[in-house]
Amino acid sequence: MRAREHPSSVHILLVPLLLSLIPLPLPHPPSHLEPQSIARNYIVRFLNYKPAADHRAYLESHLLSSPRWRWIERRNPAAAFPTDFGVVELDDRYRDGLIEELQGLGLVKDVVVDSSYSRSLFVDKSEKDWDFSEVQKGPGKLFTSMSFEEDGDRWPVGNGSVSWKRELLMERSQVTSLFGAEELWAKGFTGAKVKMAIFDTGIRANHPHFRNIKERTNWTNEDTLNDNIGHGTFVAGVIAGEDAECLGFAPDTEIYAFRVFTDAQVSYTSWFLDAFNYAIATNMDVLNLSIGGPDYLDLPFVEKVWELTANNVIMVSAIGNDGPLYGTLNNPADQSDVIGVGGIDYNNHIASFSSRGMSTWEIPHGYGRVKPDVVAYGREIMGSKISTGCKSLSGTSVASPVVAGVVCLLVSVIPENSRKNLLNPASMKQALVEGATKLSGPNIYEQGAGKLNLMASYEILKGYQPRASIFPSLLDYTDCPYFWPFCRQPLYAGAMPVIFNATIINGMGVVGFVETPPMWQPFDEVGNLLSIHFTYSDVIWPWTGFLALHMQIREEGAQFSGVIEGNVTVKVYSPALEGDKGRRSSTCVLHLKVKVIPTPPRSKRILWDQYHNIKYPPGYIPRDSLDVRNDILDWHGDHLHTNFHVMYNMLRDAGYYVETLGSPLTCFDASQYGTLLMVDLEDEFFKEEIEKLRDDVINVGLGLVVFAEWYNVDSMVKMRFFDDNTRSWWTPVTGGANIPALNDLLAPLGIAFGDKILTGDFSINGEQSHYASGTDIVKFPGGGYIHSFQFQDNSESGATQNILQATGMTKESAILGFLEAGRGRVAVYGDSNCLDSSHMVTNCYWLLRKILDFTSKGNKDSVLFHPSKVTAPLQKDNNQLPSRRNDVNFSTYSAVVGKDLLCHKDSRFEVWGTKGYGIQLMGRNRKLPGYPAMGLDSGLNPKVNESNHQPDESSRKTKWIYSGVVATNNMNRTMDFLGLLNHDESDIPMLVMSQWIIPAFVAMLCFLLFLSWRMRQKRRRRRKGSGAGSNRMTNLV
């Protein structure tokens, strides 16, 4: 009987042993956390086009056949053609290893997550009855669209729950008549034999408004070809409808409806890639994409658009509905090979919803390109309903099909047998921008070339011969407001280079080259005072390239006042095409006219620090104001001419001259400037920058103004969420500003910011201001001037203070400080939202003017510098200051961490390629204290394997990773350890420890108990003999 008891005891020991090997059960996550999934789809891009079966066989021959991965069959019309990618499902438990294995294969280009795209239905925010307080705009590549607005209809907006009802503002108009389409119809041009691809929500068969629906294809996971939303049908109606109430431009155009969005307005990268490949394979002529998003680093999508246009498909795309804000261009309309369309109303005013330029790809070292290319009517445009009848909609995605319809009409003008020789994305763009009518009032970054002019473009195409050109072909810095911001500030000697980024449009071929370097040819001797350096595309592909002019006035022109005029010429060539006798060549001319003034006094010159701003993409840079719910990303560029453009105009009106520095602080001569203006900075600083700035302030007399932002690690952890679009974890790279870095910069001056998130209203001398998610000043030298007010602290650590405030125990927070330091003067303020046009509640331009009066001129306002504001030293231990996060690989996004100190081509010509003024030309990489050396993972915010590291000044080489290349997560499941009590999110190290260390400890304990029991059994067998031992072993089995 005793022998039978032993197996039971063994079983009792084995049960906890086996249970301990299972991870602890996970609580159900809140909606913002990662869904419980064990596999995700990834796109494997190959170097060559082959049948999908061949790609599959290649992977199966090189990867172990196991349930770790699975090939996903794509059953759509593109399956009949060779492809350059495949979709695979990867088990999360083996994902990292599989991705590394896949990327190591010789024929694999890269591996990217198959992102889910949500198209938000944006509306004209100027209309009444809108409440945007709850609208959430998720990250990733968001596809935006126009408002769906019909009498009595209510539609959801994006991921929010907003609805609306809007009345039509004016009588419905025939947009075709406004552009004179009847003139071309009368000549017999109606879009015949033009293949028009409409990428949208589909269209219903036998729709009475269309005479030539050639093909409908479905690329979604829904089993329908019909449009159940109405957007795709409306777009098709604007292009090719024939109903008398809502005529389209090209009624005989062949419609190819690509259904790439579900009824829930969701799509995937792979659906688009397949549909794009099919459009290439079936020789589409024109493609309309009335959607877009802010992520221009979504490489699979961007590169496929390049490939599409390289195959002679003319793409027309909406510029976006994020106006009237600047720096809000949407991709792919912001690509130079795509015709980007903005919207106007019937009074030829830029529509409030239409996104504004410039492009932000080039920031911080360069300057953005001109977009949109053209504008067209986009408000209250008539189009087709789902089944029958007409309706009116507004948005840039309405303006886009207006231009697409015009393009179809113009394509039909060229005889079919010569279209491919003359028409391409470049020649069509040349016809549109050169024929456009410039509007009086809007600037070039609002209207591009101007309003679409159908008949002028027709005349250009009639006699078109392949050539290259520059857009814009005229830079007249005396023409205001069209050439804003350049016309607002003349050139002068000693300034940072003024950069203009023009576009080379090459109608001669998809590939082109600059044959001879660009040349500046002034009209007279005085023009030699203008020195121009050029940067340009090594290869002009597809169809377009860039030509950047870096302009400086020579020192001998310091007292010159007048106008300089001349031409910039550049010769472009393309390889010979079939039938050509030789290569095609063309000389492009850009006419330049600039105004020059004597160099202003130092006190009037301000230098804006652009270099230390980080924007989305590629990182999750959170918004500055946490009160804003409908835009969680800081993606407008943080440039003087984008979301700070109103402040720029104010400074110019006040008589200041503002220059931009896109290089480190070692790359400017402080003796030339009254004030260095640093606003909303997210990046780190080189050690040399910190040392130089201290010397510039104390010994050179430079004024320093810093507008900071919130930074609180606990709150940043709270903001971490799982994004359904990219299906990866998104962690803020930093706060609204990088306070630990700013504190390092200001430490030699004895100043530091804290980690409060303060919100509230305050008043100084009758000037009402709003403090929106700003920080506090916690260290400041005695003898300076400090202004403190009572605010609500919205940080995670501010709960106790808020309770005290509710009971009447209030405490003021310091937010504004003034200090004289050596020969220089310093002013610091904890909030930048009052300068940022994006989400401003009230501006603080009045305060900025008084601050600059102090830092640049030494003038002290009687209120700001009242004796009662003189402060005793504010002290706080350094170990109590805000600390850096150590779970985010900051070098992926930083221009400093892991990079060389180098002056770029936005700095003075004499320091290009050097370390700057007075810096030895020796290599030095900046390594961020508290960040360990690590191999970069492939996600948006790669995580480290350790949480505690000592500062290390050694250099570290890093590689650049584009946003969305591979979304990774080191956890197979999600567990909110502390959330078992309060549902708050823990950091990664705690999550990993809680999920595996405790079960491992239990397993080890049980294993030791099991070994102890086995040893006792062996001793018993020796005593009782081999027979009994055999019986016991048999029982155990």
Image (cartoon, rainbow, N blue to C red):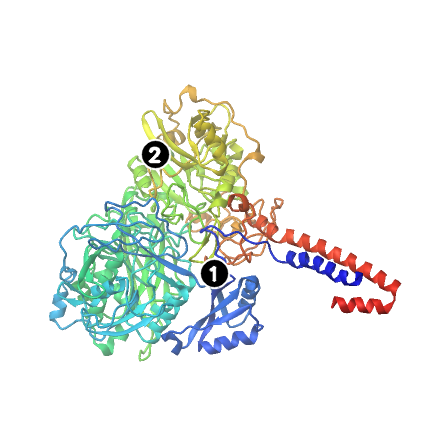
Q: Which residue is mark 1?
A: 965
Question: Image quarter for residue 270?
Answer: bottom left
The numbered mark, 2 or 1, whose residue comes first in the sequence reads: 2
Residue at the spot x=77%, y=69% of the render?
1034
Q: Amino acid at mark 2?
A: Cys
Q: Is residue 186 above or below residue 730?
A: below
Mark 2: which secondary structure?
loop
Q: Position of residue 304 (x, y in %)?
A: 39, 67
Q: Is residue 221 above or below residue 731?
A: below
- Looking at the image, residue 822 sits to the left or right of residue 626; the answer is right
Q: Is residue 997 above or below residue 819?
A: below
Real-space Cα separation, disc 2 to disc 1, in angstroms: 40 Å
Q: Which residue is mark 2?
A: 844
- Looking at the image, residue 183 sits to the left or right of residue 282; the answer is left
Mark 1: give few (<14), some (14-19) or many (20+) Cα within 10 Å.
Answer: many
Q: Position of residue 300 (x, y in %)?
A: 42, 64
